[in-house]
């Protein structure tokens, strides 16, 4: 039923677009909060961004490179943006969440991530939706969910390709999840 699809999208495009909306909402929640609430919202944002980008890097980008016109150029631009976002997220982790510098960097990151998501949706996701069958999109959706289940929960700049994610991802994910458990965040 359509209602189920809205609650838990199985199509990779619907799934990732829904996450883009969640990411935008988490940015706003983080920016409007303070203290422990801001810290908690930022941890949720950081985690969602990390697992979301891993799924795109492992599942969506490789397919887009092969299936859409000028896919290599489009994906390369998105990977550059993802690498920059991971660097900024790492910088933000070291700042006091209530500092002016944190707020300024997070606001700039939000703007960059929103532009990035808009580019993905228009240049990559929509074109994949045109090129692939509904069954292929659903299979990719299942693969994206699996990739997220074992993805790192923190940003790892330099790990923006399918090969890098498959090589470093499981170890990074294990370390991230252990770190999250030890310090109680994640």
Image (spheres, rainbow, N blue to C red):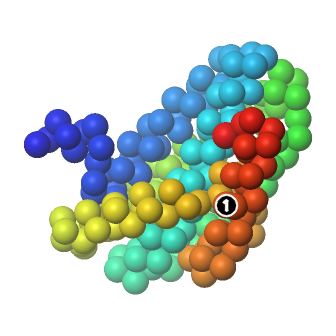
Quarter of the figure with residue 183: top right
| Residue 180 in the image: above or below residue 172 | above
Q: Depth check: 45 or 31 in front?
A: 45
Tell whether 86 sits left or right of 112. right
| Residue 94 coordinates in the image, percent (x, y) | 88, 41
Quarter of the figure with residue 81: bottom right
Who's the residue at 88% across and 29% down the image?
A: 96
Who's the residue at 73% across and 44% down the image?
A: 180
Q: Can residue 63 be seen from the camera position used here?
A: yes
- Identify the image quadrant of the C terminus: top right
Who's the residue at 26% across and 63% down the image?
A: 138
Q: Which residue lies furthest to the left in this view?
A: 1
- Identify the image quadrant of the N terminus: top left
Q: Depth check: 178 or 33 in front?
A: 178
Q: Depth check: 166 or 84 in front?
A: 166
- Other-residue count near label 1 (Cα within 10 Å), few / some / many at <14 / 14–19 / ≥20: some
Quarter of the figure with residue 35: top right
| Residue 74 coordinates in the image, percent (x, y) | 50, 70
Tell whether 3 sits left or right of 174. left
| Residue 28 coordinates in the image, percent (x, y) | 59, 25
Q: Mark 1 points at which residue?
A: 173
| Residue 185 in the image: above or below residue 58 | above
Who's the residue at 51% across and 57% down the image?
A: 149
Q: Depth check: 165 or 117 in front?
A: 165
Tell whether 46 sits left or right of 129. right
| Residue 78 in the image: above or below residue 20 | below
């Amino acid at each position: 039923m359509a209602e189920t699809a809205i609650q838990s999208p199985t199509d990779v495009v619907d799934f990732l677009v829904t996450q883009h909306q969640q990411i935008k909402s988490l940015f706003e929640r983080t920016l409007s909060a303070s203290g422990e609430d801001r810290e908690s919202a930022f941890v949720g944002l950081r985690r969602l961004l990390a697992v979301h980008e891993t799924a795109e890097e492992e599942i969506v980008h490789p397919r887009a490179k092969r299936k859409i016109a000028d896919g290599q150029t489009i994906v390369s631009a998105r990977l550059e943006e993802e690498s920059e976002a991971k660097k900024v997220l790492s910088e933000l982790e070291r700042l006091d969440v209530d500092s002016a510098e944190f707020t300024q960097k997070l606001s700039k990151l939000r703007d960059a991530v929103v532009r990035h998501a808009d580019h993905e949706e228009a240049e990559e996701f929509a074109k994949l939706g045109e090129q692939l069958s509904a069954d292929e999109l659903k299979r990719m959706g299942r693969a994206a969910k699996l990739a997220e289940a074992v993805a790192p929960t923190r940003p790892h700049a330099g790990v923006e390709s399918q090969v890098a994610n498959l090589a470093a991802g499981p170890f990074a994910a294990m370390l991230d999840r252990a770190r999250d458990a030890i310090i109680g965040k994640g």
